[in-house]
Image (spheres, rainbow, N blue to C red):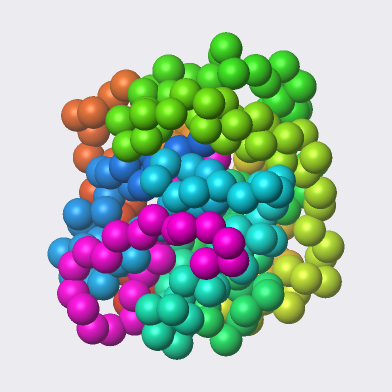
Amino acid sequence: VNGINMYYEVHGRRDGIPLVLLHGGGSTIEVTFGRVLPVFAGSRRVIAVEEQGHGRTSDRDAPFTFETSADDVAALLRYLKVERADIFGFSNGASVALQVAIRNPQLVRKLVFASSMTKREGAHPQLWEFMKQADFSNMPEPLKDAFLRVKPDVQQLKTMHDKDAARMQNFKDVPDDMLRSVNASTLIVLGDRDIVKPEHAVELTRLISGARLLILPGGHGDYLGEMVMTQTNTRYPELTARLIEEFLDSQQ
């Protein structure tokens, strides 16, 4: 796909509108969606994807951008002969999902935009302070371990980290007019202690026509049971998945 070998998995049913899962920055399918993917796969077709340079997907001699990753996802869906899909993106994956909806609106029926922002001011200042200091040495160990489990290549891991950091350090606001052009039914999701400001999520519901808002207890990724979090005995991942399924199955 567009010069890279993209890794993807298909779970669950083989018919119906598929749900495409797009992981967060520095992550793999298992890191972001390991706790919720089995819930989704119990009732629908699930296509889980690893982005350029992440996990088992190869890299290209180009920076990571949300736009090029969105084009990769669109090309994959065409390859799989998927005419329309629901797309659930978390963190950087949400920014990719949004670009799929903007650049290929005919492909997206419903959009779940989780724990991401469309403006720099939409995130708490601590995020940008952290990104200024981003270095391979302070990359979370669970993310390093997860990458090396599926691809034991330390150099590619470092390249992925550096490209991901550069993408966030150079984050550009998405123009409001682009958000107003989104015609997919949209659910905005975040934690009440997320990197995204709750007021930004509210703003998105006003910019994206008909968008709904779901705020759950916890920090970045807590409600999904993301692998970088240490708490494993919570029911939040299953409850989150069920709430998202209600949105996907609704007529809105």
One can see residue 250 in this view? no
Q: Residue at x 45, y 87 (%)?
A: 83
Magenta stretch prevailing secondary structure? loop
| x, y percent for residue 36 | 27, 50
Q: Is residue 171 above or below residue 138?
A: below
Relative to the observer, which residue lies in front, 154 or 131?
154
One can see residue 238 in this view? yes
| x, y percent for residue 75 | 53, 74
Question: How many labels, in total?
Answer: 0
In which quadrant of the rendered view does residue 100 lie?
bottom right
Q: Which residues are magenta?
A: 1-25
| x, y percent for residue 85 | 43, 77
Q: Is residue 192 above or below residue 15?
A: above
Q: Left or right? Give the position of 153 relative to 176.
A: left
| x, y percent for residue 207 | 73, 67
Relative to the observer, which residue lies in front, 96 or 217?
96
Q: Residue at x 59, y 18 (%)?
A: 136
In which quadrant of the rendered view does residue 95 lie?
bottom right
